[in-house]
Amino acid sequence: MTFASYLLTIVGISVIGVIIEIIMPDGEMYKFVKGIFALFVTFTIIAPVPKLLNKSETVTAPEYKTDVEYSYDEEYVRFVNELYVDNQVREAERDIKRLTGIDTDVDMVCENKKILEINVKADKQVISENDGHILFTDNVKMYFVTKFNIEAKQVNVIWK
């Protein structure tokens, strides 16, 4: 049974139901016939469901060709890596500015999204040079260690 014939059957049964309701007089017989007809319409609507559930089509795994050589575009991979690094650098500069109030230039050396080294150049000198520099350096290293899960020795802080 196609979908069009299924839909036509439902419409036809509904039209017959309306005609029977118009012809039937009110009373107990009307309620009985209306209930039976509603049951008939429900069974007609549900009729295709068992056919859909009992489909016994076999599913076969696709055949993979093992002799095919695959390649990737190195320029695109490089572009994606640069985009990743640029986004991480902008985010780090913004976060450090928000945390410490000091403007920085961040350079990340990455290879395939793996961070090899981070160089942070701080623009502004602090009032107490020794204490302030140490505190700033520790905070910046801790930021990168927690954010990127790298070792502190991979982060270099340089004062301009």
Image (cartoon, helix red, strand yellow):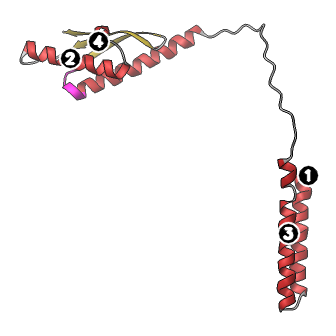
Residue matched to label 1: 2
Point 22% across, 20% down: residue: 139
Q: Residues within 10 Å of mark 3 (few under 14, many from 20)?
A: some
Above or below, comparing residue 61 to residue 76 in the picture:
below
Residue matched to label 3: 41
Q: Magenta residues?
A: 98-103
Amino acid at the residue labelled 4? Ala
Upstream in the sequence, badge 1 or badge 2?
A: 1
Asked if residue 125 can be seen in this view, the reply is no
Residue matched to label 2: 138
**Real-space Cα distance between discs 2 and 4?**
9 Å
Q: Nearer the viewer, mark 1 or mark 2?
A: 2
Res 106 → quadrant: top left
**Real-space Cα distance between discs 1 and 3?**
18 Å
Image x and y of residue 104, in percent: 25, 17
Residue matched to label 4: 152
Q: Nearer the viewer, mark 1 or mark 4?
A: 4
